[in-house]
Image: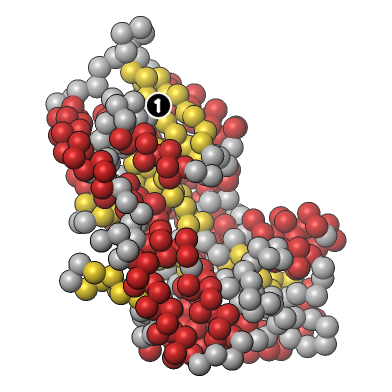
Amino acid sequence: MKYRLLAGVSALVTAAALSACSSGGDTADEAGGATKVDVWLMRDSVSAAFQEEFTKGFEAAHPDIDVRIQIQEWDGIGQKITAALASNDAPDVIEAGNTQVAQFAESGGLLDLSDKRDELNGDDWLKGLAEPGAYDGKQYGIPYYAANRVVIYRKDLFEKAGVDPAAITTREQWIAATTKLNKGGTQGIYLPGQLWYALAGFIWDEGGDFAVESGGRWKGALDTPEAQRGMAFYAQLQALGKGPKDSDEDDPPQAEVMAQGQVAQVISTPGGAKVVAENNPGLKDKLGFFPIPGKTAGTPGAVFTGGSDLVVPAAAGHPEAALTFIKELTGDAWQRKLAVAMSYVPNRTTLASAVAADPGAAAMAVGAANGHATPNTPGWAAVEAENPIKDYMTAVLTGGDAAKEAAKASEDITRAMNAGS
């Protein structure tokens, strides 16, 4: 994806914004006295009740700032943010998906917030949010909240099989337990063949990745021994159920499959349990959660960290007030309240205790400590759009030569990532 069209004007815009920020440059709007800060937050990232509570609390603490939050839709948000960054009428704060930040930073349209890391407790940030929020050695995105996948399991089926979920702390133990559960009419696990986010974690556990950078050029890395070991584990686990080999978790929706009553486990965000219960109310109190196991008992399995960062456009009219807003929303008090209200993982490892009373969120928080993100480059968007990873997974699971399929997929990733360079 190309965002270089902004580069010609971005240097001047960035300089102006930095100058305003460093000189205490926010001025009150002429009509009132308070500085009006425009904020874009995404649909469902906060509830209406939390938004109201935060706005009232923030404005009480900062009577000189008037917050105006606009809720945006995820569909088409990339193009909308790109247009806003190129305009002279950008909002002051934008919520962006953590893996989107590199695209917007490449354009030159974001304010460099590297010097704010210390005051925002940057040493404790979840790396799955912080790393993709950085680009070319500079921090543009401030971690906001995270979500990742866990194992949702049937308590009654585990008890019937004599399996203690608390004893599953390694991948080896997970395979043994799932094999024991995969008996009669019960599927040990429902794992569709193209759940590539789960595959990512297994590859990272082995020390591999989807792509690596060398000399300024990205190269697909599914053909490395590490990545192939991750795929081999995925295949071993996938065989312990009847998940389709040629589709992902949405076709059919895996929560609906679990609701039918014959599935012992799925890999999902905790919200999937609510969908299961909606489709089968009889399972409401029979669902539990545990973190995806890692290779050793001391380290949870690596997970793809979804979630959002907060960015400040270089063209923001009120950069200092924007940073005040971000400091509050990502600070201890409001992060704890947000995590409880929305069942999110807070943006810092030191705040994990905030969700201790929420079993699903607590399991997420354990995994989030070993969270990762996809390759941090604007070219990754082209890979996800084409997604040769899914085709690769299906090919291997249906009997294709693992090494040859990995080499082909790596070539496709390399081509996609470098298409615009």
Q: Quadrant of residue 194?
A: bottom right
**Residue 222 higher or lower than 307, as above or below:** below
Left or right: 229 in relation to 93: right
Left or right: 418 in relation to 222: left
Q: Which residue is mark 1?
A: 38
**Residue 107 higher or lower than 359, as above or below:** above
Secondary structure of the residue carrying numbered label 1: strand
Q: Amino acid at mark 1?
A: Asp
Q: Position of residue 247 (x, y in %)?
A: 64, 71
**Residue 241 higher or lower than 12, as above or below:** below
Q: Position of residue 39 (x, y in %)?
A: 42, 31
**Residue at the image point whose x is 20% and y is 36% from the top:** 9
Residue 67 shows in this picture: yes
Q: Residue furthest right?
A: 282
**Residue at the image point whose x is 64% and y is 56% from the top:** 271
**Residue at the image point whose x is 21% and y is 56% from the top:** 136
How packed is label 1: few (under 14 Cα within 10 Å), some, or many (20 or more)?
A: many
Q: Position of residue 421 (x, y in %)?
A: 25, 61
Left or right: 378 in relation to 365: left
